[in-house]
Image: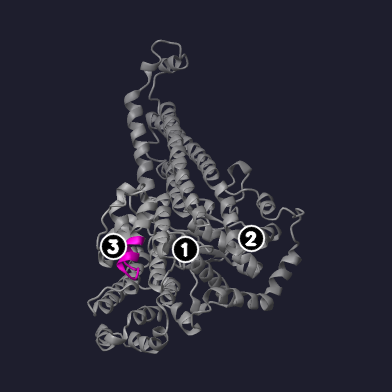
């Protein structure tokens, strides 16, 4: 299944190229039409020149065009579009949380959540642990319809948004199907494409906004120059220009809708299929889609930004006058693919309400069992602790404490100067100390939304304390190394967006060979003796088609830290090679020890390798 995610990410990258091509064609069309509009409305050309232009067979036709003026107009329009796109991209650079807030979402805090919201948060946690990604923060939109979205540049900054209608009208299986669909977008690499689409389309639609602003400006200054006939003529030209730009704006919206439909529609079928693979329950997501057909408000989202971001949603968020512009396939077509035996009849409103009311007792037990299947090995007390902003930092610190250095580490915590933190660590330490390294990593995964509620100053102080705790023994430890890098990657990135963005994405092994060999060497070093280490090294080299005589460098965790950015931002196809290399190296001796299993789990998390629910890291 993991390979499907890699292939899907490659397809998403291909769609990015399609997006750029379509955007370029739209901009060129708008440049040509804007030039024509300026020439006609502002009287740039004389009547005789227009007659020549209407006779393309005339030998002077081409030379009569006002190339100098057209060059400046084109440059101005292109510059405006580029600036608008850049501003929008900068606005969205913070990732998923910006999109969620723009759509009216509010962060769901576990401590304040009601029963329905806690059920939602539990489902999101289960999916994240099964998929091997950070647990994303969840935002709730005050919308009566049934819809949801995933947004972000990568799993590290992803968020999931859900409408109140989902909580009110869907049972647990159906809600799980919707969330699985959104997780598929996270793992399939669709989110980065979707955010880029928002920025690019905002640029081509800005031309229409310019005409609207120009028209309003004319209204405010109508009295200026009223007595001048020349001013009246110019005013008429400017009025025509403003109206023309507004028409071009609608044309930009037309292009935008076509581009969204071309890029987004097939991705929804893929996400539906992936959701079924996640849940093993096609009736869940199919039932959610049927509920949309039965609900009074369907999947429509009223937020004013919904049109701009309509391609992000689980189902069609905006009413379209033509299916040509739909960002999603027809509802019935999606259901038929998931449930071929469906008779085409949607449930009634009464059945929908009955379905929702019946879930209160039965699905609590179902939900409990499903949650237990994923998280049963973790103490309930620690799970609860990981979900709250006040206690999650203490949990991370407790995971870094070592019995042999406890006195020194306690002194560091006391020096930190937060009595509440000290008290919480003391309360957690005994239970945390009984956990395996892999269990501690799972708790850190779950703690991500709570840790993201820290302010930048609080995070810096917390991160410094974690670094001091991990370095007190002067030795490198895999768990400590993973926690520190995980905090920086998942939480630090919201304060430093540059960690999410890298232009020079490595697409082939030669570009990152040194980093890959460092990774393979560290993986091989986990084997028990030199013979097994060399066996693991040779197996990895063979898979990468590298010479068997390649020397194995000694590698430390701190040295690998320097190589992580290049590996994190490598292409999906290259990551697929990395994951296969790591598994083959670890399994070379037909035995996976606890340290090797934790290393695989840590690297899958840090490198954003989409493991998926079918793949075991052990």
Circle 1 residues within 10 Å: few <14, some 14–19, many ≥20: many
Judging depth in this view, the residue of 57 and 610 nearest the camera is 610
Q: Is residue 534 magenta?
A: yes
Closer to the chain start, of discs 3 and 2, is: 2
Dot 1 corresponds to which residue? 159
Vertical placement of 418 versus 231: above or below? below
Q: Is any part of residue 276 visible from this angle?
A: yes
Closer to the chain start, of discs 3 and 1, is: 1
Dividing the picture into quadrants, the one containing residue 530 is bottom left
Relative horizontal placement of residue 433, taking residue 113 as reference (left or right): left
Dot 3 corresponds to which residue? 560
Residue 187 location (% of width, % of height): 48, 57
Closer to the chain start, of discs 2 and 1, is: 1
- Disc 2 to disc 1, how far (Cα)? 20 Å
- Disc 3 to disc 1, how far (Cα)? 29 Å
Dividing the picture into quadrants, the one containing residue 588 is bottom left
Residue 269 location (% of width, % of height): 59, 51
- Which element type, helix, strand or loop, lies under badge 1? strand
- Which element type, helix, strand or loop, lies under badge 2? helix
Mark 3–mark 2 CB contact (< 8 Å): no
Magenta span: 525-535
Relative horizontal placement of residue 409, taking residue 138 as reference (left or right): left
Vertical placement of 232 versus 271: above or below? above
Circle 2 residues within 10 Å: few <14, some 14–19, many ≥20: many
Residue drawn at point x = 25 percent, y = 60 percent: 553
Dividing the picture into quadrants, the one containing residue 493 is bottom left
Residue drawn at point x = 60 percent, y = 66 percent: 176
Tag nearer the camera, 2 or 1: 2
The numbered dot on residue 285 is 2
Tag nearer the camera, 3 or 2: 3
């Amino acid at each position: 299944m993991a390979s499907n995610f890699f292939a899907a990410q490659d397809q998403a990258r291909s769609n990015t190229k399609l997006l750029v091509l379509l955007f370029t064609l739209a901009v060129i069309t708008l440049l040509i039409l804007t030039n024509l509009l300026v020439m006609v409305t502002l009287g740039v050309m004389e009547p005789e020149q227009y007659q020549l232009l209407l006779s393309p067979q005339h030998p002077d036709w081409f030379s009569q065009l006002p190339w100098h003026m057209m060059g400046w107009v084109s440059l101005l329009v292109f510059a405006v579009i580029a600036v608008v796109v850049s501003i929008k991209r900068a606005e969205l650079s913070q990732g998923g949380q910006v999109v969620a807030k723009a759509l009216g979402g509010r962060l769901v805090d576990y401590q304040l959540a009601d029963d329905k919201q806690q059920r939602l948060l539990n489902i999101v946690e289960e999916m994240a642990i099964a998929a091997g990604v950070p647990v994303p923060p969840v935002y709730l939109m005050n919308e009566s319809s049934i819809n949801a979205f995933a947004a972000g540049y990568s799993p590290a900054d992803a968020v999931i948004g859900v409408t109140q209608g989902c909580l009110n009208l869907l049972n647990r299986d159906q809600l799980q199907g919707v969330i699985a669909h959104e997780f598929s977008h996270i793992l399939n690499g669709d989110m980065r494409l979707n955010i880029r689409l928002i920025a690019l389309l905002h640029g081509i639609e800005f031309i229409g906004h310019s005409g609207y602003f120009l028209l309003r400006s004319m209204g405010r200054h109508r009295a200026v120059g009223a007595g001048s006939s020349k001013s009246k003529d110019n005013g008429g030209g400017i009025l025509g220009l403003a109206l023309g730009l507004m028409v071009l704006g609608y044309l930009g919206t037309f292009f935008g809708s076509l581009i969204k439909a071309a890029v987004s529609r097939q991705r929804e079928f893929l996400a539906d299929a992936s959701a079924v693979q996640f849940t093993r329950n096609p009736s869940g997501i199919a039932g959610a889609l049927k509920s949309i057909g039965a609900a009074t408000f369907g999947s429509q989202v009223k937020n004013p930004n919904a049109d701009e971001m309509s391609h992000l949603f689980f189902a069609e968020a905006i009413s379209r006058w033509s299916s040509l512009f739909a960002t999603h396939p027809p509802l019935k077509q999606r259901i038929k693919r998931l449930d071929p035996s469906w008779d085409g009849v949607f449930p009634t409103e009464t059945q929908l309400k009955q379905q929702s009311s019946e879930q209160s007792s039965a699905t609590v037990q179902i939900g409990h069992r499903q949650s237990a299947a994923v998280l049963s090995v973790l103490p309930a007390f620690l799970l609860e602790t990981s979900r709250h902003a006040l206690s999650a930092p203490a949990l991370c610190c407790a995971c870094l404490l070592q019995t042999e250095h406890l006195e020194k580490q306690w002194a560091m915590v006391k020096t930190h100067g937060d009595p509440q933190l000290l008290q919480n660590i003391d309360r957690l330490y005994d239970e945390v100390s009984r956990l395996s390294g892999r269990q501690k990593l799972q708790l850190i995964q779950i703690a991500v939304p709570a840790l993201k509620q820290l302010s930048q100053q609080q995070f810096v102080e917390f991160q410094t304390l974690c670094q001091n705790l991990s370095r007190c023994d002067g030795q490198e430890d895999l768990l400590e190394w993973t926690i520190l890098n995980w905090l920086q990657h998942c939480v630090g990135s919201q304060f430093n967006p540059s960690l999410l963005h890298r232009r020079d994405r490595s697409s082939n092994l030669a570009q990152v060979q040194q980093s890959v060999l460092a990774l393979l060497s560290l993986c091989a070093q986990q084997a028990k003796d030199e013979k097994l280490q060399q066996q693991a090294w040779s197996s990895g080299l063979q898979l990468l088609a590298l010479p068997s005589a390649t020397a194995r460098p000694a590698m430390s965790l701190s040295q690998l830290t320097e190589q992580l950015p290049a590996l994190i931002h490598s292409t999906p196809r290259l990551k697929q090679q990395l994951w296969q290399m790591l598994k083959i190296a670890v399994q070379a001796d037909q035995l996976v020890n606890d340290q090797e299993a934790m290393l695989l789990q840590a690297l899958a998390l840090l490198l954003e390798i989409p493991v998926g629910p079918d793949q075991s890291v052990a």
